Amino acid sequence: MALYAISDLHLALSTDKPMDIFGVQWVNHDEKIKKNWKEKITEKDTVLIAGDISWSMKHEESKIDLDWINSLPGNKIISKGNHDYWWTSISKLNSMYDNTKFLQNNFYTYNDYAICGTRGWIDPNSDKFNSKDAKIYAREQIRIRLSLDAAKKSGFNKFIVMIHYPPFGEENKESELMKIFQEYNVEKVIYGHLHGPSNVKAIEGLINGVEYIMTSCDFINFDPIKILED
């Protein structure tokens, strides 16, 4: 039994959104994911998928992509990305499958770890940041606290966080989200969102006791990476 991670699947099985416009590495990328997934992941494993799951705009359209994910081996835990416009109520999503669950203000478990998370947002020091972004960023801080607090109240003290946006501040400064991770003694944070030329901005490794792991599909060659094993 092991814990794996991947993000930014950008599936488009029900819509015309070919990913190969972003580079030849994206040609038939869903088949690459499926092949790599089936070669290493068993029904006893768990896979964390941190956002940008489907290009679908509506919940009904996204079901084809979600069914595709659910058909793959293992348990899946999904959190929201900035392109997941199909995302509906968490209760509705979590009623869909037995082996695929959705994360929002709640938590799931892997052995003695609590899997927590939220979407995240762009950093307040970004030139593009505005008053609307400020409200969203504040809400995302509340959501990650709700997730972590729910796990703490249930007796957990070992945490892994899923977040879609890179949580680092501009020029790699410490962000408010990073401070929260340190406050709760989070062990690992997986994130995605970056692609192509932006992958050079990826930061990995230990920062103030928290391990950061980049999991965007094209960064990890469309191959889920193992982050924990019994």
Image: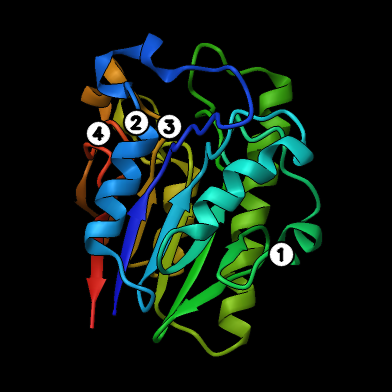
Question: Residue at the spot x=66%, y=57% of the render?
Answer: 104
Residue, disc 2: 29
In what element is the residue under mark 4? loop
Residue at image x 44%, y 38%? 9
Q: Which residue is disc 3 drawn over? A: 193
Q: Residue at x 50, y 59 (%)?
A: 71
Query: How far is disc 2 from disc 3 in space, using C-alphas?
Result: 16 Å
Earlier in the chain: of badge 4 and badge 3, it is 3
Q: Nearer the viewer, mark 2 or mark 1?
A: 2
- One can see residue 80 in this view: no
Residue 176 image point, x, y percent: 50, 45
Please tell me whether mark 3 sits on a helix, a strand or a loop: loop
Q: Identify which amino acid the numbered label 4 is placed on.
A: Phe
Asked whether, in this view, residue 53 is left or right of residue 192, the answer is right
Quarter of the view holding residue 86: top right
Dot in front, 2 or 3: 2
First reached walking from the N terminus: tag 4 or tag 1? 1
- The answer to whether any part of residue 200 appears in the image is yes
User: Label 1 crowding class (10 Å Cα cut-off): few <14, some 14-19, many 20+?
Assistant: some
* 85 relative position to 46: left or right: right
Q: Position of residue 60 (x, y in %)?
A: 78, 40
Closer mark to the observer between disc 4 and disc 3: 4
Kind of residue at disc 3: His
Write down the residue under mark 1.
Answer: 94
Of circles 4 and 1, which is in front? 1
Q: Amino acid at mark 1?
A: Asn
* Picture quadrant of residue 1: bottom left
3 and 1 marks in contact (CB < 8 Å): no
Circle nearer the N terminus (4, 2): 2
Residue on which the image places disc 4: 219
* Amino acid at the residue labelled 2: His
Q: Earlier in the sequence, mark 3 or mark 1?
A: 1
